[in-house]
Image (cartoon, rainbow, N blue to C red):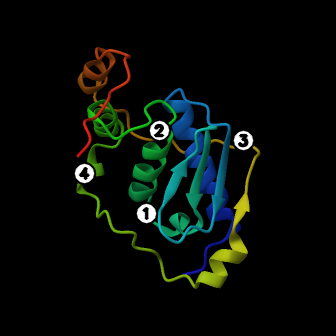
Amino acid sequence: MTILSGDIARLRLRTLMWAERLSLRPRAVRVQAMRRKWGSCSTSGTITLATDLAACDRGVQDIVIVHELLHLRIRNHGRRFRALMTVHVPHWRDADESRHVADVAPEEIEQLAVVLDSPEAIAEPVAEAPAEAEAAVETETAEPEVEPEA
């Protein structure tokens, strides 16, 4: 499967749509070749997504996008983080955690690595989260969660 620049633009727009929905403002959204993970969130607020994520279905895209965006608010994977993931992408726990990629050659991915930085278009809407789940998360304290070391 070939990943086109339009696919990458749609992935970026989907990220910006989710950022607006979550009331978050990433400093930048980058799409580039990544061999070991689907995305990352830097301490400076840059969201980076794997180019080949554009070839995945929207459900997988949403899980990765929401996961990385939530790290702008919560830097760990604690209880609050998991609760927010469940509110916004309820199917996230069912997703296969391995990094399956479309049949795209690595050199093709390298050629398509881009940084997109114009927030002009609007992505299609996503179904709203259940109101009771949203309310449950809003009642949590804003204190950062500290997880015990394993």
Task: Kindly state the secondary structure of the residue where label 1 is placed.
Answer: loop
Residue 93 position in % (x across, y down)? 25, 51
**Which mark is first along the chain, 1 or 2?**
1
Mark 2 or 4, which is nearer the eye?
Answer: 2
**Which mark is first along the chain, 1 or 4?**
1
Task: Kindly state the secondary structure of the residue where label 4 is placed.
Answer: helix
**Which mark is first along the chain, 2 or 3?**
2
Task: Kindly identify the residue that appears in the image at 53 percent across and 72 percent down.
Answer: 35
Left/right placement of residue 52 relative to residue 60 reads: right
Mark 4 or 3, which is nearer the eye?
Answer: 4
Residue 57: image tag = 1
Number of numbered discs on residues:
4
Q: Inspect the image, locate mark 4, and give the three-letter code of the amino acid beneath it.
A: Arg
User: Which residue is disc 3 drawn over?
Assistant: 119
Residue 75 is drawn in which quadrant?
top left
> Is residue 101 depicted above or below 119 in this figure?
below
Quadrant where the image shows the N terminus? bottom right
User: Which residue is disc 4 drawn over?
Assistant: 93
User: Which residue is disc 2 drawn over?
Assistant: 71
Front residue (pair 133, 115): 115
Q: Inspect the image, locate mark 1, and give the three-letter code of the amino acid beneath it.
A: Asp
Task: Kindly identify the residue that appears in the image at 47 percent across and 38 percent down.
Answer: 71
Residue 106 position in % (x across, y down)? 59, 82
Left/right placement of residue 46 relative to residue 91 reads: right
**Which mark is first along the chain, 1 or 3?**
1
How far, Cα to Cα, is label 3 from label 2?
Answer: 21 Å
Task: Kindly identify the residue that appears in the image at 48 percent across and 45 percent down.
Answer: 68
**Mark 3: few/some/many CA within 10 Å (<14, 14-19, 20+):** few
